[in-house]
Amino acid sequence: MKQKVVVTGMGVISPLGNSIQEFETALKAGKSGIRRITLFDATDFEVTIAGEVKDFDPSRWIDKKDARKMARFTQFAVAAAKDALEQAGLVEVTENGRNRLLSDPEQTGIVLGNGIGGFEVVTESFHKLFDHGPRRMLPLTVPLMIGNEAAGNISIIFGSKGPAFTQVTACASGTDALGQALDLIRSGRCAVVLAGGTEACIVPFAVGGFQMLKALSTKRNHEPEKASRPFDADRDGFVLGEGAGILVLESEAHALHRGAAILAEFAGYGASADAYHITAPAPSGEGGGRAIALALKDADLAPEAVQYYNAHGTATEINDPTETKMVKYAFGDHAYELKVSSIKSMTGHCIAGSGGFEAIASILAIREGFYPPTINLDKPDPACDLDYVPNTVQYGPIDVAVSGSLGFGGHNGAVVFKKYPKN
């Protein structure tokens, strides 16, 4: 029999706010976090908007000396991890101002999704290399930029000594990291795992690269809040975002033994590969649909048990009708009974961070009984014919929610969360 895994803490740094309360309030309000880019001068770009994290002062969570040795994506992850650990009651600050883990360090692991790493560090170091030569490069270029450093820094700062992994499956990274963490706990390798995703790539190189792929929205630079339009007939691409969403996962036995408040059960995970194309999903939707079906099988749930599907929902021409087919593949006729929504309409697409955000949104939806809206859905695409909770939050009981993610390369991941019966 599979060991039950539960969620006991959550932390978020996002375009919708830097706390769970701010994030939840914005979701319910249908508030967009997309604005004009301020992290660099985007004047010469076709794209001048993004979902930036605002009012982020790393010293609120991290010692200033430590923060200077971290790229932005790592700072986001450490901050979200600290908030998640505090909610779970698994960290305390010692007299000398350091963090002390309150679980067995050797039984506490980390699995973070990250797609791109410290791109702002790469950009700065390339400029120094080409303009002034290698001796002017940042001394910490490599440890700042590489994707595993978020997990590494969390381990160092909080003292966890179990596995510290980084999952890289593009935009599915955060969701796949959660699935890998689920398996670590079920196998008995860990009792506690911090898991989720983090990303910070609103830099000229990344925006320019996605722009050249014709993946980004360019039609609504003058009205940023309306640019991300999943499932809408007038969508024209995704809006890049950033941030981190981190969950504390535990075996149910471990959580009950210490008297933890349990937020939800993490019931299942499924993954698949399309084996089709380097950037486009398989048009049939079979690959992503199979990941959802595998997650439901892992959770030992019938499709009819699910009330809410949190969509990948990028607002690209190809993704949205293909994901609609995915949902129909996995849920059959029940697809028309589901509520489906994309919070990327509010956050933008935060690459690996999205899987963490969307898992947290799904858990909040279960706990608070609400369906986050898909804002800017004014003219539904006829090929997208499900209930996408257009524009305004809806309320109702939710026992089971599924969150799906798709990544370049044909990576598909899905996770299942259940209402915890003792809540």
Image: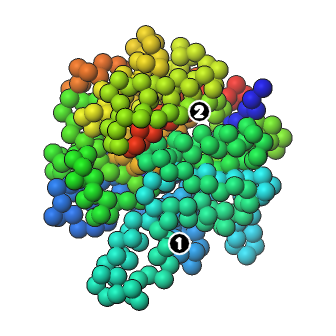
- In the image, which disc is placed on residue 128? none
Amino acid type assigned to the residue bearing label 2 in the image: Tyr
**Numbered label tally:** 2
- Structural crowding at the residue carrying mark 2, measured as other residues with C-alpha within 10 Å and reported as few (<14), some (14–19) or many (≥20): many
User: Which x, y percent locates residue 39?
Assistant: 31, 66
At 64% across and 30% down in the image, what residue appears? Answer: 267
Residue at numbered disc 1: 143
Scheme by which the image is coloured:
rainbow
- Residues 272 and 239: in front is 272
Please identify the quarter of the rendering in which residue 405 is found.
top left
Q: Earlier in the sequence, mark 2 or mark 1?
A: 1
417 relative to 222, above or below: above
Q: Quadrant of the N terminus?
A: top right
Residue at numbered disc 2: 269
User: Which x, y percent locates residue 260?
Assistant: 75, 42
At 28% across and 64% down in the image, what residue appears? Answer: 204
- 414 relative position to 163: left or right: left
Amino acid type assigned to the residue bearing label 1 in the image: Pro
User: Which x, y percent locates residue 98?
Assistant: 70, 71
Q: Which SS class for mark 1? A: helix
At 68% across and 39% down in the image, what residue appears? Answer: 183
At 28% across and 52% down in the image, what residue appears? Answer: 210
263 relative to 52, above or below: above
**Marks 2/1: CA distance?**
31 Å
* Residue 293 visible from this viewpoint: yes
- 128 relative position to 14: left or right: left
Q: Quadrant of the C terminus?
A: top right
User: Which x, y percent locates residue 421?
Assistant: 70, 25
374 relative to 339, above or below: below
Q: Which SS class for mark 2? A: strand
